[in-house]
Image (cartoon, rainbow, N blue to C red):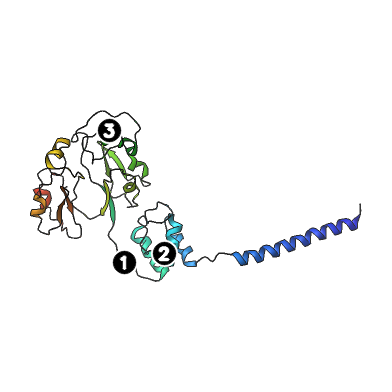
Amino acid sequence: MDILGVVLAAGLIGGLGVIIGLLLGVAGEKFKVEVDEKEIAVRELLPGNNCGGCGFAGCDGLAKAIAEGSAPVNGCPVGGEPVAAAIAEVMGVESEAGEKMVAFVKCAGTCDKAVTQYNYFGITDCNKAQVVPGHGDKKCSYGCLGFGSCVSACPFDAIHIVNGVAFVDKDACKACGKCVAACPNHLIELVPYSAEYKVSCSSNDKGKAVKDACAAGCIGCSLCAKNCPAEAITITNNLAKIDYSLCTGCGTCATKCPVKIIR
């Protein structure tokens, strides 16, 4: 064995290793991405659900936006006030107390209330079922189809189908908005957790057509609006709507509603 050859080969390999290491070090320094320490700290405080309810592409996106100042410290609907307070401390700002929001399904057309046009046998998905004739098997084309696309979309097991209509567990709901986006009939909206009275209907049909399709629909009679002492209710497209910023929770609207869909 040529000892000199072995030594030269080892030296050559070692030298190449040193050169490659130096080049990698220079490249790493030149192309390194600066990461804001606040962004890292904020990301560690976020729950990690990556639900998208904040409007960003997961918790990483929200953390970056908060660190840059383009998103509020209370931007995470899942973490709520405790997380917002911790993030505010990292950012050196005050956390503004915000109203807790929850999802609400604007439909009371349960199996015993809604009139069905035919028996549907097909894919149990609302987006698929709503394209069949009549916009679903229920005579009311505005109502909950009851096939649970919202249930599948909810990452917190906060919404379930009860007697043919989606129902939200307000204590489990994190207001991420997944169910809102999943509903093809746009029946779900985010409302204040403290809202005591809500309109459980979305139909824009006139009174007679509503009654022909469902025993629990808003007939647009205006009695709720006329009797509301806070003027918090308006009738738009034959449907009662509550302005929660004005509502005092007195319950007059629910008392006056002849079909009892304000509940």
Residue 106 image offset from top left, x and y in percent: 23, 46
Badge nearest the viewer, 1 or 3: 3
How many neighbours does mark 2 have within 10 angstroms: few (below 14), some (14-19), or many (20 or more)?
Answer: many
How many neighbours does mark 1 have within 10 angstroms: few (below 14), some (14-19), or many (20 or more)?
Answer: few
Q: Is mark 1 on a helix, strand or loop?
A: loop
For the residue pair 125 and 172, the one nearer the viewer reads as 125
Name the mark on residue 66. Answer: 2
For the residue pair 164 and 172, the one nearer the viewer reads as 164
Q: In the rendered image, which quarter is residue 162 located in? A: top left
Tell me if 52 is positioned left or right of 209 in this view: right
Residue 240 image offset from top left, x and y in percent: 16, 50
The residue at 81%/60% (across/down) is: 12
The residue at 67%/62% (across/down) is: 24
Residue assigned mark 1: 96
Tell me if 60 is positioned left or right of 132 in this view: right
Q: In the rendered image, which quarter is residue 159 located in? A: top left
Tell me if 218 is positioned left or right of 131 in this view: left
Residue assigned mark 3: 133
